[in-house]
């Protein structure tokens, strides 16, 4: 029985965005220990605020300060916090309707156990000691038995407003490729490139998907393709990414779609061994393997004459 391929994968990137006047005021307010909502056309106060009325779609700008106290509307216990979550010890995720607001804000509640949490309980914001203008300026919520606060108008003006944020996005998961892609990866480890042929349209797909994307029928017949191929189209990359910097790849470089000989679908790979401004459609290339690698590091020119356009025009 063959071992099932499986590997941990991480997808991570920083998402940078600018803020409009409403979101800017909200996040700057958190930095100043002030929670702002926005009033809709029908008088409801939304926290967190949005820039357009969810009912009328009209732009809304009327800001209102709400209290740092509120009521839990629903909750779920988190017994095993993950890295970068608000608290390192078990806590409750809660939706809190702050006093003066008509919608609920999602955050963490610091509580000794699930028996200490209930819908309807009163809570207040515990502010982070160091605040920068982010939702993490609210460290968490904590139980509170004082009087409710009241909303008050606010012009949203603060010194040094926050105008942009960087939101890191990260997804950790374990990938199991399945039969078709598992066979493809195992062949790559032997420096062979395998595709699968559709029994209906006779096309060979690389990497294989286990089914023909055109006909929808299962594919099982394995076909070795390449290793040489033709550049069908390409782009010049001028922005250095973290993973390429770690590999010693300098910009500019070329990423191309390559139609391997015998395949009916182009795969993408980096082109090396040639100045970036000499890469062209029709360029004949071959894979370059590094010691111990499970896949080609890049493709380089073979020295053959360029392929005729008619030979690859259907694979653009």
Image (spheres, helix red, strand yellow):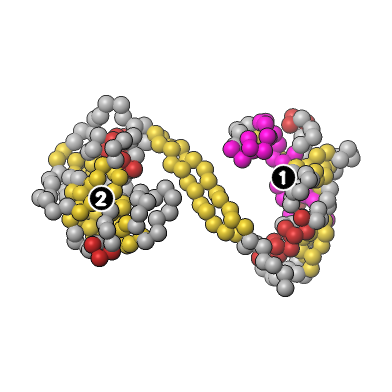
Q: Secondary structure at mark 1?
A: strand
**Horizontal arrangement in the rendering, residue 19 relative to residue 209 (left or right):** left
Q: Which residue sits at x=69%, y=40%?
A: 255
Does residue 215 appear in the picture of this structure?
no
Q: Is residue 283 magenta?
A: no
Crowd class of label 2 (few under 14; some 14 to 19; many from 20; radius 10 Å):
many
- Which residue is at the front of the view, 236 or 15? 15
Specify which label sits upstream in the sequence, 1 or 2.
2
User: Which numbered circle lies on residue 312?
Assistant: none
Image coords of residue 316 (percent x, y): 72, 47
Quarter placement of the N terminus: bottom right
Q: Which residue sits at x=44%, y=50%?
A: 83
Residue wearing tag 1: 269
- Which residue is at the front of the view, 222 or 10? 10
Measured Cα–Cα span from mark 1 to mark 2? 48 Å
Crowd class of label 1 (few under 14; some 14 to 19; many from 20; radius 10 Å):
some
Which residue is the extreme one toward the right?
304
**Horizontal arrangement in the rendering, residue 96 relative to residue 182 (left or right):** left
Task: Give the quadrant of residue 182.
Answer: bottom right
Mark 1 near mark 2, Cβ–Cβ under 8 Å?
no
Which residue is the extreme one toward the top?
159
Q: Which residue sits at x=49%, y=48%?
A: 170
Q: Which residues are magenta?
A: 242-271
Image coords of residue 232 (percent x, y): 75, 44
Residue wearing tag 2: 141
Q: Is residue 246 magenta?
A: yes
Q: Secondary structure at mark 2?
A: strand
Image coords of residue 79 (percent x, y): 37, 61
Does residue 134 appear in the picture of this structure?
yes
Tell me: residue 128, above or below residue 72: above
Q: Which residue sits at x=31%, y=58%?
A: 92
**Horizontal arrangement in the rendering, residue 80 relative to residue 65 (left or right):** right
């Amino acid at each position: 029985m063959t071992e099932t391929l499986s590997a941990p994968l991480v997808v991570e990137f920083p998402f940078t965005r600018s803020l409009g006047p409403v979101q800017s005021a909200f996040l700057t307010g958190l930095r100043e220990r002030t929670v702002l909502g926005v009033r809709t056309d029908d008088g409801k106060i939304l926290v967190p605020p949005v820039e357009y009325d969810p009912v009328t779609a009209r732009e809304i700008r009327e800001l209102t300060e709400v209290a740092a106290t509120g009521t839990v509307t629903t909750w779920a216990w988190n017994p095993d916090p993950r890295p970068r979550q608000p608290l390192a010890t078990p806590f409750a995720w809660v939706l809190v309707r702050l006093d003066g607001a008509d919608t609920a804000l999602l955050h963490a509640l610091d509580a000794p156990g699930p028996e200490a949490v209930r819908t309807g309980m009163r809570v207040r914001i515990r502010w982070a000691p160091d605040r920068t203008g982010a939702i993490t300026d609210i460290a968490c919520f904590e139980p509170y038995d004082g009087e409710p606060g009241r909303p008050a108008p606010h012009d949203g003006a603060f010194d040094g407003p926050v105008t942009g944020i960087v939101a890191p996005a990260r997804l950790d998961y374990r990938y199991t490729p399945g039969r078709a892609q598992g066979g493809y990866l195992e062949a790559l480890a032997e420096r062979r490139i395998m595709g699968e042929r559709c029994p209906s349209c006779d096309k060979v797909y690389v990497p294989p998907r286990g089914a023909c994307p055109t006909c929808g029928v299962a594919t099982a017949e394995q076909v070795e393709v390449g290793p040489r191929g033709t550049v069908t189209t390409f782009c010049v990359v001028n922005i250095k990414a973290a993973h390429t910097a770690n590999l010693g790849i300098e910009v500019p470089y070329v990423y191309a779609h390559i139609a391997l000989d015998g395949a009916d679908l182009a795969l993408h790979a980096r082109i090396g061994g040639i100045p970036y401004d000499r890469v062209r459609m029709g360029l004949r290339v071959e894979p370059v393997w590094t010691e111990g690698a499970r896949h080609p590091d890049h493709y380089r020119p073979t020295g053959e004459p360029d392929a005729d356009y008619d030979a690859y025009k259907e694979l653009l």
